[in-house]
Image (cartoon, rainbow, N blue to C red):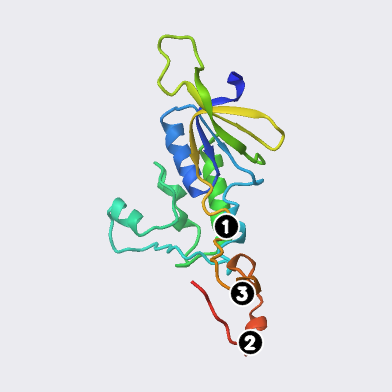
Amino acid sequence: LDQAHFHDYCIIGAGPAGIQLAYFLHQAKRDYIVYERSSQAGSFFINYPRHRQLISINKRNTGEKNRKFNLRHDWNSLLSNDDHLRFTHRSKKLFPSADLMVNYLNDFYRHHNLYIQLNITIKNLKPLSEQTTTCSSKDCSFLSTARFRMNDQYDNSYTCGIVIVATGLSIPNIPPIDGIDLAVGYENVSLVTEEFENKSVLILG
């Protein structure tokens, strides 16, 4: 067992969910790592939403001073002990640019020095046929056991106690409809509004 590539927690995907979980694991001083296939965190928001405007509200003013109440109306900020890192400080718009989310997520993980490895594509995730302990001490935690093995695009091998897949929606959901091959999926829809002028548009879903 290669202990150099073992972690109690392996998180696949450095989007909002992966970064948020990494923050809490970091605060708890747990052994974790995040693997992200892109060159930066939050890569989903580089292309989505396609119209480049978030659909999650950025409500800066609620009329209340209660922190928890305000967080319930702030749909973009990650939870942390530092309110200066709230997304609401980034824009005054109710529906900000998606580009701000990319910058926010990267600034957040760098500020907290979270353990994220970029440009790593995980594949061949499999449970180990035999679980292997990773330490010889009697004080080993329950998590210090390798239960999963996986590889990256360079065929490096990694083992983990617990794997959390936080990749979100990775491929489009194409329904089995006759003629669907003639339609344009949301993932490829044009952003040039002139292309839709004086045309009938049918939206499925």
Q: Do callouts 1 and 2 mark residues in contact (Cβ within 8 Å)? A: no
Quadrant of the image containing the N terminus: top right
Picture disc at residue 87:
none
Binning the other alpha carbons within 10 Å of mark 3 as few (below 14), some (14 to 19) or many (20 upward) gives: few
Camera-side residue: 115 or 131? Answer: 131
Query: Label 1 to label 2, Cα distance in Å?
Result: 27 Å
Which one is earlier in the sequence, the residue at label 3 or at label 2?
A: 3
Q: Name the kind of residue labelled 2 in the image.
A: Glu
Q: Earlier in the sequence, mark 1 or mark 3?
A: 1
Give the residue pinned by disc 3.
Answer: 179
Is label 3 in a helix, a strand or a loop?
A: loop
Residue drawn 44% across the image and 48% down it: 78
Depicted 108 relative to depicted 162: above or below: below
Closer to viewer: mark 3 or mark 2? 3
Q: Nearer the viewer, residue 52 or 172?
A: 172
Q: Could you tell me residue 164's position as x and y percent?
A: 48, 39
Tell me the element at label 1: helix
Q: Residue at x 52, y 74 (%)?
A: 204
Location of residue 101 with respect to 17 vertically, above or below: below
Cα separation between marks 1 and 3: 30 Å
Q: Secondary structure at mark 2?
A: loop
Residue 152, above or below 184: above
Q: Which labelled disc corresponds to residue 197? A: 2
36, 93: nearer the viewer = 36
The amino acid pointed to by label 1 is Phe
Q: Amino acid at mark 3?
A: Gly
Residue tagged by mark 1?
Answer: 45
